[in-house]
Image (cartoon, rainbow, N blue to C red):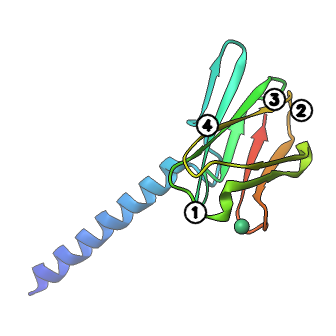
Amino acid sequence: MKSTAFSIIIAGLLIGGAILLTGNKTGDTEGSRSNVTVADGKQIVEVTAGNGYSPNLTVAKADMPTVLRMETVNSFSCASALVIPKLGVRKNLPSSGTTDIDIPPQKAGSTLQGLCAMGMYNFSIKFE
Ligand SMILES: [Cu+2]
């Protein structure tokens, strides 16, 4: 009986640890860099719009022409009505597809925020 309880506790700890590790991998607390690629002197930041935006926080390079590539896959939530106030951007994303938005070079330390039209969902891109 005691060893069963012990196994359950160990299993619980393992599952908990796995969840913590997976949580860290998305890097939402520190910001994701894995969705940023550089090609031909431009950086491409990929953000998925579905039930909200993913990743929530992206860390990108400052002082570099940037393309924000919004991806939607069967997205019918209001996340597809995208607003980027700082850039004066308002876009209706297709329910499925990619939409490129040009972002001029941003200063180090600045943050761009994207929102759904109602302000329910948001994401940020931090430039460093
Ligand atoms: Cu909304």
Q: Return the disc, 4 or 1, that comes first in the chain's sequence.
A: 4
Residue at label 1?
51
**In which quadrant of this rendering is ligand 1 seen?**
bottom right
Label 1 CB sits under 8 Å from any ligand 1 atom: no
Q: Secondary structure at mark 4?
A: loop
Which amino acid, mark 3?
Answer: Ala
Q: CA distance from mark 4 to mark 3?
A: 13 Å
Residue at label 3?
62
Crowding around mark 2 (Cα neighbors within 10 Å: few <14, some 14 to 19, many 20+) is some
Quadrant of the rendered structure where residue 34 is? top right
Discs 2, 3 touching: Cβ within 8 Å: yes
Q: Is residue 5 above or below residue 67?
A: below
Q: Return the disc, 1 or 2, that comes first in the chain's sequence.
A: 1
Q: Nearer the viewer, residue 27 or 45?
A: 45
- Image location of residue 75, percent across then percent down: 56, 57
Crowding around mark 3 (Cα neighbors within 10 Å: few <14, some 14 to 19, many 20+) is some
Q: Residue at left 89%, top 51%?
A: 85
Label 4 CB sits under 8 Å from any ligand 1 atom: no
Q: Return the disc, 4 or 2, that comes first in the chain's sequence.
A: 4
Q: Is residue 78 above or below residue 91?
A: below
Quadrant of the rendered structure where residue 117 is? bottom right
Residue at label 4?
33
Q: Which quarter shows the C terminus? A: top right
Which amino acid, mark 4?
Answer: Arg
Q: Nearer the viewer, residue 24 or 102?
A: 102
Q: Residue at left 24%, top 70%?
A: 10
Q: CA distance from mark 4 to mark 2?
A: 17 Å
